[in-house]
Protein backbone atom coordinates (compact mmCIF):
# COMPACT_ATOMS: atom_id res chain seq x y z
CA UNK A 1 0.00 0.00 0.00
CA UNK A 2 2.88 2.39 0.75
CA UNK A 3 4.07 2.08 -2.85
CA UNK A 4 0.52 2.49 -4.14
CA UNK A 5 0.05 5.88 -2.45
CA UNK A 6 3.69 6.99 -3.14
CA UNK A 7 4.38 7.30 0.58
CA UNK A 8 8.11 7.88 0.02
CA UNK A 9 7.55 10.79 -2.35
CA UNK A 10 5.27 13.52 -0.99
CA UNK A 11 6.08 16.28 -3.50
CA UNK A 12 2.57 15.93 -4.91
CA UNK A 13 1.03 16.31 -1.46
CA UNK A 14 2.98 19.53 -0.89
CA UNK A 15 1.96 20.92 -4.27
CA UNK A 16 -1.68 20.17 -3.48
CA UNK A 17 -1.44 21.51 0.07
CA UNK A 18 0.43 24.77 -0.54
CA UNK A 19 -2.34 26.65 -2.41
CA UNK A 20 -4.74 25.75 0.42
CA UNK A 21 -2.23 27.09 2.93
CA UNK A 22 -1.82 30.30 0.88
CA UNK A 23 -5.59 30.71 1.06
CA UNK A 24 -5.88 29.88 4.76
CA UNK A 25 -3.16 32.36 5.73
CA UNK A 26 -4.52 35.11 3.48
CA UNK A 27 -8.17 34.62 4.42
CA UNK A 28 -7.33 34.62 8.13
CA UNK A 29 -4.87 37.55 7.98
CA UNK A 30 -1.88 35.45 8.97
CA UNK A 31 -3.55 33.59 11.84
CA UNK A 32 -5.36 30.55 10.46
CA UNK A 33 -7.07 28.35 13.09
CA UNK A 34 -5.06 25.25 13.97
CA UNK A 35 -8.12 23.09 13.29
CA UNK A 36 -8.36 24.26 9.69
CA UNK A 37 -4.63 23.82 9.20
CA UNK A 38 -4.93 20.26 10.48
CA UNK A 39 -7.98 19.41 8.37
CA UNK A 40 -6.51 20.75 5.13
CA UNK A 41 -3.08 19.22 5.76
CA UNK A 42 -4.51 15.78 6.37
CA UNK A 43 -7.00 16.35 3.56
CA UNK A 44 -4.19 17.10 1.11
CA UNK A 45 -2.42 13.87 2.03
CA UNK A 46 -5.63 11.85 1.69
CA UNK A 47 -6.75 13.45 -1.58
CA UNK A 48 -3.32 13.18 -3.17
CA UNK A 49 -3.17 9.52 -2.12
CA UNK A 50 -6.66 8.96 -3.56
CA UNK A 51 -5.63 10.72 -6.75
CA UNK A 52 -2.59 8.50 -7.35
CA UNK A 53 -4.59 5.35 -6.61
CA UNK A 54 -7.25 6.36 -9.14
CA UNK A 55 -4.51 7.32 -11.59
CA UNK A 56 -2.83 3.94 -11.26
CA UNK A 57 -6.12 2.12 -11.69
CA UNK A 58 -6.87 4.04 -14.87
CA UNK A 59 -3.33 3.75 -16.26
CA UNK A 60 -2.33 0.25 -15.15
CA UNK A 61 -2.22 -1.03 -18.73
CA UNK A 62 -0.27 2.03 -19.90
CA UNK A 63 2.15 2.11 -16.97
CA UNK A 64 3.67 -1.29 -17.77
CA UNK A 65 4.93 0.17 -21.06
CA UNK A 66 6.61 3.25 -19.51
CA UNK A 67 10.10 2.94 -18.03
CA UNK A 68 9.39 5.23 -15.07
CA UNK A 69 6.08 3.59 -14.07
CA UNK A 70 6.39 -0.10 -14.97
CA UNK A 71 7.28 -1.04 -11.37
CA UNK A 72 4.13 0.47 -9.85
CA UNK A 73 2.15 -2.12 -7.83
CA UNK A 74 -0.78 -2.38 -10.25
CA UNK A 75 1.40 -2.31 -13.36
CA UNK A 76 3.67 -5.14 -12.22
CA UNK A 77 0.91 -7.23 -10.66
CA UNK A 78 1.83 -6.91 -6.97
CA UNK A 79 -1.66 -5.60 -6.25
CA UNK A 80 -4.98 -6.50 -7.86
CA UNK A 81 -7.38 -3.77 -9.04
CA UNK A 82 -9.98 -4.79 -6.44
CA UNK A 83 -7.42 -4.21 -3.68
CA UNK A 84 -6.68 -0.74 -5.02
CA UNK A 85 -10.42 -0.03 -5.19
CA UNK A 86 -10.75 -0.89 -1.50
CA UNK A 87 -7.91 1.52 -0.69
CA UNK A 88 -9.63 4.22 -2.77
CA UNK A 89 -12.90 3.62 -0.93
CA UNK A 90 -11.18 3.91 2.44
CA UNK A 91 -9.48 7.16 1.44
CA UNK A 92 -12.79 8.56 0.17
CA UNK A 93 -14.44 7.80 3.51
CA UNK A 94 -11.62 9.55 5.39
CA UNK A 95 -11.92 12.60 3.11
CA UNK A 96 -15.67 12.66 3.70
CA UNK A 97 -15.16 12.52 7.47
CA UNK A 98 -12.84 15.52 7.26
CA UNK A 99 -15.20 17.55 5.10
CA UNK A 100 -18.21 17.13 7.37
CA UNK A 101 -16.31 18.96 10.12
CA UNK A 102 -16.32 22.10 7.96
CA UNK A 103 -19.03 24.68 7.25
CA UNK A 104 -21.92 24.07 4.82
CA UNK A 105 -20.50 25.98 1.85
CA UNK A 106 -17.27 23.98 1.99
CA UNK A 107 -19.25 20.74 2.14
CA UNK A 108 -21.15 21.84 -0.97
CA UNK A 109 -17.85 22.51 -2.78
CA UNK A 110 -16.28 19.18 -1.82
CA UNK A 111 -17.97 16.90 -4.42
CA UNK A 112 -16.30 18.98 -7.14
CA UNK A 113 -12.90 18.12 -5.65
CA UNK A 114 -13.76 14.41 -5.72
CA UNK A 115 -15.08 14.66 -9.28
CA UNK A 116 -11.87 16.36 -10.46
CA UNK A 117 -9.76 13.67 -8.77
CA UNK A 118 -11.75 11.01 -10.62
CA UNK A 119 -11.68 12.78 -14.00
CA UNK A 120 -7.99 13.67 -14.14
CA UNK A 121 -6.62 10.16 -14.82
CA UNK A 122 -8.85 9.86 -17.90
CA UNK A 123 -8.17 13.38 -19.19
CA UNK A 124 -4.89 12.11 -20.66
CA UNK A 125 -7.01 10.27 -23.21
CA UNK A 126 -9.32 13.18 -24.06
CA UNK A 127 -7.52 16.51 -24.08
CA UNK A 128 -4.13 17.78 -25.18
CA UNK A 129 -3.40 19.52 -21.85
CA UNK A 130 -4.50 17.18 -19.06
CA UNK A 131 -2.26 19.31 -16.83
CA UNK A 132 -5.03 21.91 -16.93
CA UNK A 133 -7.40 19.49 -15.20
CA UNK A 134 -4.73 18.84 -12.58
CA UNK A 135 -4.34 22.59 -12.05
CA UNK A 136 -8.07 23.10 -11.58
CA UNK A 137 -8.15 20.21 -9.09
CA UNK A 138 -5.25 21.61 -7.08
CA UNK A 139 -6.59 25.16 -7.26
CA UNK A 140 -9.96 24.04 -5.94
CA UNK A 141 -8.28 23.45 -2.59
CA UNK A 142 -7.58 27.19 -2.33
CA UNK A 143 -11.25 27.96 -3.01
CA UNK A 144 -12.39 25.45 -0.39
CA UNK A 145 -9.89 26.77 2.18
CA UNK A 146 -11.17 30.33 1.69
CA UNK A 147 -14.77 29.18 2.00
CA UNK A 148 -13.93 27.20 5.15
CA UNK A 149 -12.34 30.32 6.64
CA UNK A 150 -14.90 32.98 5.76
CA UNK A 151 -18.08 31.19 4.78
CA UNK A 152 -17.96 32.83 1.35
CA UNK A 153 -15.72 32.96 -1.73
CA UNK A 154 -14.22 36.39 -2.37
CA UNK A 155 -12.11 37.67 -5.27
CA UNK A 156 -8.65 36.84 -3.84
CA UNK A 157 -9.64 33.18 -3.62
CA UNK A 158 -10.37 33.07 -7.35
CA UNK A 159 -7.04 34.74 -8.14
CA UNK A 160 -5.27 32.11 -6.01
CA UNK A 161 -7.25 29.47 -7.90
CA UNK A 162 -6.09 30.92 -11.23
CA UNK A 163 -2.50 31.20 -10.00
CA UNK A 164 -2.52 27.54 -8.95
CA UNK A 165 -3.97 26.42 -12.27
CA UNK A 166 -1.23 28.23 -14.21
CA UNK A 167 1.41 26.94 -11.81
CA UNK A 168 0.35 23.30 -12.09
CA UNK A 169 0.31 23.43 -15.90
CA UNK A 170 3.86 24.78 -15.80
CA UNK A 171 5.41 22.37 -13.31
CA UNK A 172 3.52 19.33 -14.58
CA UNK A 173 4.65 20.10 -18.13
CA UNK A 174 8.21 19.95 -16.79
CA UNK A 175 7.35 16.69 -15.00
CA UNK A 176 5.90 15.25 -18.21
CA UNK A 177 9.22 15.74 -19.99
CA UNK A 178 10.36 12.58 -18.19
CA UNK A 179 7.89 10.47 -20.19
CA UNK A 180 7.65 12.38 -23.44
CA UNK A 181 8.94 9.62 -25.72
CA UNK A 182 6.98 6.87 -23.95
CA UNK A 183 3.81 8.97 -24.05
CA UNK A 184 4.24 9.59 -27.76
CA UNK A 185 4.72 5.87 -28.40
CA UNK A 186 1.68 4.67 -26.44
CA UNK A 187 -0.62 7.53 -27.42
CA UNK A 188 -1.03 9.34 -24.10
CA UNK A 189 -1.63 13.08 -24.40
CA UNK A 190 0.37 15.68 -22.48
CA UNK A 191 1.29 19.34 -22.68
CA UNK A 192 4.95 18.35 -23.10
CA UNK A 193 3.99 16.69 -26.39
CA UNK A 194 1.59 19.45 -27.44
CA UNK A 195 4.07 22.28 -26.89
CA UNK A 196 7.03 20.36 -28.32
CA UNK A 197 9.95 22.68 -28.99
CA UNK A 198 7.92 25.56 -27.55
CA UNK A 199 7.93 24.06 -24.03
CA UNK A 200 10.20 26.84 -22.64
CA UNK A 201 7.91 29.56 -24.02
CA UNK A 202 4.74 27.82 -22.84
CA UNK A 203 6.08 27.14 -19.35
CA UNK A 204 7.32 30.73 -19.16
CA UNK A 205 3.92 32.14 -20.13
CA UNK A 206 2.07 30.05 -17.57
CA UNK A 207 4.53 31.03 -14.85
CA UNK A 208 4.09 34.68 -15.78
CA UNK A 209 0.35 34.15 -15.50
CA UNK A 210 0.83 32.63 -12.07
CA UNK A 211 2.92 35.54 -10.80
CA UNK A 212 0.45 38.10 -12.18
CA UNK A 213 -2.44 36.33 -10.43
CA UNK A 214 -0.50 36.27 -7.16
CA UNK A 215 0.25 39.97 -7.47
CA UNK A 216 -3.44 40.74 -8.02
CA UNK A 217 -4.43 38.56 -5.04
CA UNK A 218 -1.91 40.45 -2.92
CA UNK A 219 -3.16 43.83 -4.07
CA UNK A 220 -6.79 42.93 -3.41
CA UNK A 221 -5.84 41.74 0.07
CA UNK A 222 -3.79 44.83 0.91
CA UNK A 223 -0.48 42.99 1.38
CA UNK A 224 2.59 45.18 1.79
CA UNK A 225 6.07 45.12 0.30
CA UNK A 226 7.36 42.09 2.20
CA UNK A 227 5.06 39.84 0.19
CA UNK A 228 6.31 41.13 -3.16
CA UNK A 229 9.95 40.88 -2.07
CA UNK A 230 9.41 37.21 -1.19
CA UNK A 231 7.54 36.66 -4.45
CA UNK A 232 10.64 37.84 -6.30
CA UNK A 233 12.54 34.77 -5.04
CA UNK A 234 10.45 32.07 -6.77
CA UNK A 235 10.11 34.38 -9.78
CA UNK A 236 13.89 34.25 -10.10
CA UNK A 237 13.77 30.43 -9.94
CA UNK A 238 11.10 30.43 -12.65
CA UNK A 239 13.23 32.59 -14.92
CA UNK A 240 16.18 30.26 -14.44
CA UNK A 241 14.02 27.23 -15.23
CA UNK A 242 12.71 28.74 -18.45
CA UNK A 243 16.27 29.44 -19.52
CA UNK A 244 17.37 25.91 -18.57
CA UNK A 245 14.52 24.36 -20.59
CA UNK A 246 16.01 25.84 -23.73
CA UNK A 247 18.71 23.15 -23.55
CA UNK A 248 18.12 19.38 -23.59
CA UNK A 249 16.64 18.15 -20.31
CA UNK A 250 17.20 14.62 -19.02
CA UNK A 251 14.48 12.86 -16.96
CA UNK A 252 16.60 13.34 -13.84
CA UNK A 253 16.93 17.08 -14.41
CA UNK A 254 13.22 17.38 -15.23
CA UNK A 255 12.31 15.72 -11.94
CA UNK A 256 14.73 17.91 -9.99
CA UNK A 257 13.24 21.03 -11.59
CA UNK A 258 9.76 19.80 -10.75
CA UNK A 259 10.70 19.38 -7.07
CA UNK A 260 12.03 22.95 -6.97
CA UNK A 261 8.44 24.13 -7.23
CA UNK A 262 7.73 22.82 -3.74
CA UNK A 263 10.33 25.22 -2.33
CA UNK A 264 8.95 28.02 -4.49
CA UNK A 265 5.48 27.40 -3.09
CA UNK A 266 6.83 27.50 0.46
CA UNK A 267 8.52 30.85 -0.28
CA UNK A 268 5.19 32.21 -1.51
CA UNK A 269 3.50 30.98 1.66
CA UNK A 270 6.09 32.74 3.82
CA UNK A 271 5.64 35.87 1.72
CA UNK A 272 1.87 35.87 2.24
CA UNK A 273 2.35 35.49 5.98
CA UNK A 274 4.89 38.33 6.07
CA UNK A 275 2.57 40.47 3.97
CA UNK A 276 -0.31 39.98 6.40
CA UNK A 277 1.80 41.31 9.29
CA UNK A 278 1.70 44.80 7.82
CA UNK A 279 -1.31 44.59 5.51
CA UNK A 280 -3.87 47.36 5.04
CA UNK A 281 -7.50 46.15 5.32
Image (cartoon, rainbow, N blue to C red):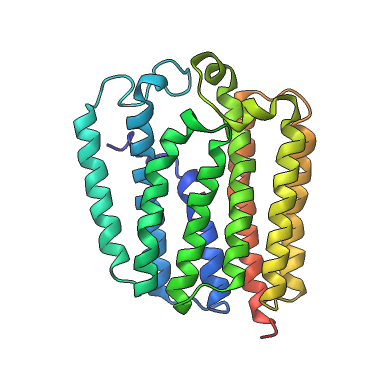
User: Horizontal placement of 42 versus 88: left or right?
Assistant: right
User: Horizontal placement of 8 versus 243: left or right?
Assistant: left
User: Horizontal placement of 281 versus 141: left or right?
Assistant: right
Above or below, comparing residue 278 to residue 115 in the picture: below
Q: Nearer the viewer, residue 159 or 25?
A: 159
User: Horizontal placement of 267 versus 124: left or right?
Assistant: right
Residue 241 figure quarter:
top right
Q: Quarter holding the C terminus?
A: bottom right
Residue 55 figure quarter:
top left
Note whether residue 196 is visible: yes
Pinpoint residue 280: horizontal percent, then vertical percent. Answer: 70, 85
Above or below, comparing residue 191 to residue 97 in the picture: above
Pinpoint residue 176: horizontal percent, then vertical percent. Answer: 58, 30
Note whether residue 70 is visible: no
Residue furthest front as drawn: 126
* Residue at the spot 69% in from the left edge and 75% down from the top edge: 220
* Residue at the spot 75% in from the left edge and 30% down from the top edge: 198
Q: Quarter holding the N terminus?
A: top left
* Residue at the spot 58% in from the left edge and 64% down from the top edge: 158
Pinpoint residue 247: horizontal percent, then vertical percent. Answer: 77, 25
How many marks are shown on the rendered structure? 0
Above or below, comparing residue 173 to residue 205 in the picture: above
* Residue at the spot 57% in from the left edge and 79% down from the top edge: 29
Q: Nearer the viewer, residue 130 or 182?
A: 130
Amino acid sequence: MADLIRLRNQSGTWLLLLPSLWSLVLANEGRPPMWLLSVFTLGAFVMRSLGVVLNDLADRNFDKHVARTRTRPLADGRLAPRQALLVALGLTLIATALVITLNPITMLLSPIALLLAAIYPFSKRWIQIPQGVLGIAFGWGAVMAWAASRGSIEAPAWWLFAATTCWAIAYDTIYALQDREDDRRIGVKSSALLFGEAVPVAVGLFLVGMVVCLVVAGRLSGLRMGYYLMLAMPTGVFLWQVRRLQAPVSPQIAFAMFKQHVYSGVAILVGIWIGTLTHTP
